Image (tube, rainbow, N blue to C red):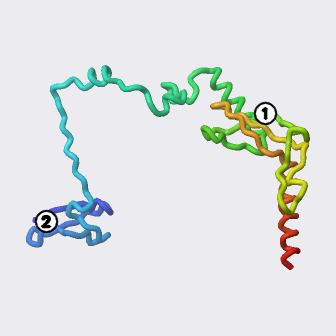
Amino acid sequence: MAEHTVCPWCSTEIVWDEVLGPEEECPYCHNELLEYRSLNVPIEVDEDSDHENQSEQDEPEEKGWSNFGWGDDAMLFGSADEMKYQEGVDRVLQEQLDVPECPQCREFMLLIGQETIEKQSFKPHAVEAIAEGMLQAPLDLDVYVCTSCFQVTKKLSPAGREELQEKIRELSEKADTEEA
């Protein structure tokens, strides 16, 4: 009488003869069959203890997603006001060209305005090749706020970025002409 084994790797049924004994290797996928890389964990069930009552009494402090406002209905925001807040945030984010992530919590940040830095409050760093500095005031910074943790981040405005890139290109071109 032949016995049957199912390969745990390829799920193919293997028929082997009683005289030859069980196969040590699957003839189809050539993986080992004899408890190779298998882990058996015995689970002891104590039928005497009332598991349900014990779990209710020893309920640990909530951790994980519950700390982030996930409600019982598996929605991020439990109330209608919170849902309206998120919908408004999503609408504003769709209109932004640049949507940075919060360095604190990784949520998307809203552009809330621009800040201008005047000449009297800005001292440019002077690079040896560029005596006047990389950027000159007045310059504008885009101000972003995180909608979750309300962290504020500032980035150089697009015009300032272009000016900085141009100065760095000029610096590179000067270095190339001095080498030639």
Residue at 32% of width from left, 69% of height from top? 29
Quarter residue 172 falls in? bottom right
* Tag 1: amino acid: Ile
Spot occupied by residue 149 in the image (x, y as percentages of width and height)? 63, 31
Image side of residue 36 versus residue 165, left or right:
left
Residue at 26% of width from left, 69% of height from top? 26
Against 139, residue 20 (above or below) is: below
Against 64, residue 122 (above or below) is: below
Image side of residue 40 versus residue 83, left or right:
left
Say if mark 2 contacts mark 1, CB within 8 Å: no
Residue at 60% of width from left, 38% of height from top? 105
Spot occupied by residue 120 in the image (x, y as percentages of width and height)? 90, 39
Question: Residue tagged by mark 2?
Answer: 2
Between disc 2 and disc 1, whose residue precedes?
Answer: 2
Disc 2 from disc 1: Cα separation: 76 Å
Quarter residue 33 falls in? bottom left
Question: Residue tagged by mark 1?
Answer: 112
Instruction: Indicate which label's residue lies in the foreground, 2 or 1.
Output: 1
Spot occupied by residue 116 in the image (x, y as percentages of width and height)? 87, 38
Spot occupied by residue 112 in the image (x, y as percentages of width and height)? 78, 33
Image side of residue 46 versus residue 80, left or right:
left
Crowding near the residue tagged with mark 2, few <14, some 14–19, many ≥20 C-alpha atoms within 10 Å: few
Residue at 49% of width from left, 29% of height from top? 66
* Tag 2: amino acid: Ala
Circle 2: element type: loop
